[in-house]
Image (cartoon, helix red, strand yellow):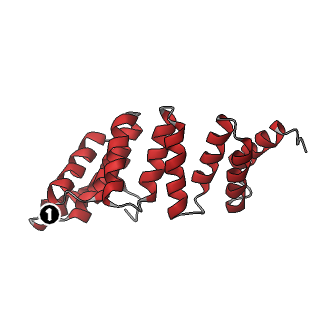
Amino acid sequence: LAEKNNMKALKFLKKAYECEEGKEDVELILDIALLYDKLGNPVLSKKMYKEVLNIDENEARAYYGIGVLYDESENFIEAIKYYKKTISIDENYDKAYFFLANCYDEIGEQEKAIENYKEVLRIEPRDLWANANLGCIYDEIGEIGLAIEYMSKALEINSKHFRILFNMGVFMAKLGEND
């Protein structure tokens, strides 16, 4: 992995997995699942996450990983189930809240998206994209004051990001602040 040679890394991880201890090593199996996903093989990735859950049914990272696989295939309803399961195990799993919020936004449930982005910010107040995405959702629902508030927080975190600057420009133009 350090050499950024994913196929070579997979070969060695699979070799370790074939050892007796390897079939019970949650960290090893999670690494294999992540690598399969990175290599574009969601079927084998999901299989490995399921193996982790057979070892430890309360392994939040495995539920999260499966959620990501569904999310990547735009099966947002299934992804939501897995992100919620992740959160039920680890209520401070900020990435699960983040992608849960995104799924809700994708299916048009903006209030639930807002609620979950706010959970991300409860855990990590300086999350650039939770702030920016909240700003965009508030803009979409006509709450320009809240849109500017959250986009301003995003700008405090990264004052040079082109998307954040563009969105803030759009918001200010809506207020007639063309400068």
For mark 1, what is the residue? 24
The image quadrant where one finds the N terminus is: bottom left
- Near-viewer residue (8 or 140): 140
Q: Nearer the viewer, residue 74 or 94?
A: 94
Q: Residues within 10 Å of mark 1 (few under 14, many from 20)?
A: some
Residue 56 picture location, percent across and down:
18, 60
Q: Residue furthest bottom?
A: 21
- From this viewpoint, which residue is outermost toward the left? 20
Q: Looking at this view, is 178 or 147 the one in front?
A: 147
Residue 5 placement: quadrant: bottom left
Q: Is residue 40 at all visible to an observer of this figure?
A: no
Eyeballing the image, is 177 above or below 158? above
Q: Residue at x 67, y 55 (%)?
A: 154
Q: Secondary structure at mark 1?
A: helix
Tell me where residue 76 appears, x and y as whole percent. 40, 36
Q: Residue type at mark 1?
A: Glu
Q: Position of residue 51 (x, y in %)?
A: 17, 52
Q: What residue appears at the point 84 percent right and 39 percent down from the top-left corner?
A: 175
Is residue 164 toward the left or the right of residue 177 in the image? left
- Residue 36 location (% of width, % of height): 30, 48
User: Can the viewer see residue 57?
Assistant: yes
Q: Residue at x 34, y 51 (%)?
A: 64
> Residue sitting at 64 percent across and 49 percent down?
132
How many numbered marks have been drawn onto this rendered protein structure?
A: 1
Give whichever of 154, 123 is nearer the camera.
Answer: 123
> Would you place residue 126 above or below residue 178 in this image?
below
Side (left or right) of 81 relative to 120: left
